[in-house]
Amino acid sequence: MEKHLNLTLKIWRQKNAKAKGNFEAYKMTGISTDMSFLEMFDVLNERLVNDNIDPIAFDHDCREGICGACSMVINGRPHGPKNAITTCQLHMRSFNDGDTITVEPWRASPFPIIKDLVVDRSSFDRIMAAGGFVSTNTGSAQDANCTLISKEAADESLAAAACIGCGACVAACKNASAMLFVSAKVSQFALLPQGQPERKKRVLEMVAQMDTEGFGACTNTGACSAECPKEISLTHIARMNRDYLMAELC
Amino acid sequence: MKWIIKMFSSTIGQKFIMALTGLFLCAFLIVHTLGNLQLFKSDGGLAFNTYSVFMSTNPVIKCISYLLYATILLHAIKGFMLLRKNKKARPIDYAVQGGSANSHWTSRSMGILGTILLLFIVVHMYNFWFEYKFGHVPFTSYFTNMATGETKFQPMSADYVQANKMEEGMISNEQGQFRVVVVKDLFKEVEISFKEWWLVALYVICMFSVSFHLYHGFQSAFQTLGINHSKYNGLIQFIGVWFFSIFIPIAFAAMPLYFFFK
């Protein structure tokens, strides 16, 4: 049943990449528990615009858990208190009347803040450009049944490919490590026959780019997987470590 | 050579170093625990002292011990380097910490637990390794009756010295045949040291650090090396939790407590 909440929001405000940011508190009244978290932000922004205050900048696009744009750390957890969802899938019924909700941007050197809660995640794009693809030659398509793939390998590959590149793994990791993201992108091809020709080159170049971007190292805390909206498994990190070792050794 | 340097300077390569050195240190802990269990033998320390002489004079063991010191340093230095790198990746921390909701605290505290262990190793080596090698450890003579197996011992005078850490021989008299061993008495050193309550407390507290560090560290090393499979994850977890995180710290903590309450 719909209820209405009175909340205090503490939101990180930062004018631009170079400005020094700080938390601003906003009182919200009569917030419907049926609203999504982003809808609550829309209500707040509408009020700010009416009051001639710069609205809060936040990333959002599909609002159905697919695009991975809605990057926010809510009360210390990427995408809020629920597991396996993005912020747009978080509803206000997950909060209680009188709560103070702290909202911060992803915190990582390779994700510099552009404004307020918006961060620049193009470091992920550069990692993908370094090797997150398969090279395809032109020509007529083969019969699909010519390429044999086991059900298990296909499932595992698709589980890795479910990664939407939202960056919650980096945000959740105490070291701001991108290992879960990179390993998902390495795994999705490493498990398929189509990914084999460039398997070694891919892992070496993606890891090299990951290091160049300045992400931290993996302490295997598992926070990344626990906070991942697509529940990407740590087994992909182990696979990438194996692949990296094999690619360097032979 | 270039590829080796490249591999071990990458983030994953540096973690390989942490994993390999960590597992080597785990292997050492097994030997160290089993060897030191001889402290509980009621032979006045003969078995432990003989073992100590073997461990400090055998050329193979000596080589391994130098490798061990280097491994401890490498593990610690690499750990600090990674800590710095990780801090650089997140220079501004979150105002609200939500780590407890998504990870175990031991996994988030490896740096601080490791630092405690490093300091403990320095204290521990000063207490016994330095004392045994450079300090004045008295000698004790042990007489083992070859017929009954009964061992009696007598401390030598404080100014007694001999060329080797251990001399042994046989003597016979009207009471029977005896094996005589005169050996540097590290056992006595342990016995005296652990009469100090603060040292016992320090050792016991540090064993909690060993436990928590290995609770995460042992399993984490396998994950880093790419060994994560439902076939053997259970076994790795079992060994990590029950052997390295419970048995070994309890066995070590029992030693100072045993001598304190003896």
Image: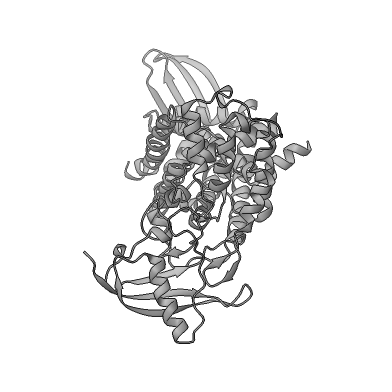
**Is residue B103 or residue A19 the one in the foreground?**
A19
Residue at the image position 39 percent from the left and 58 percent from the top: A89
From the viewer's perspective, is residue A93 above or below residue B33? Answer: below
From the viewer's side, name the closer residue of B132 and A203. Answer: A203
Q: Is residue B12 left or right of residue A63?
A: right
Let me know if residue B29 appears in the view: no
Query: Which is more toward the observer, B160 or A224?
Result: A224
Residue B163 against residue A89 in the figure, above or below:
above
Quadrant of the frame with the C terminus of chain B: top left
| Among the 4 quarters of the image, the one containing residue A186 | top right
Position in image of residue A146 (x %, y %): 58, 22
Task: Name the quadrant containing residue A201.
Answer: top right
Question: Which of the 4 image quadrants contains residue B41?
Answer: top left
Of all residues shown, which one is farthest toward the left? A1
In the image, residue B203 above or below residue A147: below
Quarter of the image containing the N terminus of chain B?
A: top right
Q: As displayed, is residue A217 above or below residue A75?
A: above
In the rendered structure, the answer to whether residue B150 lies left or right of residue B181 reads left
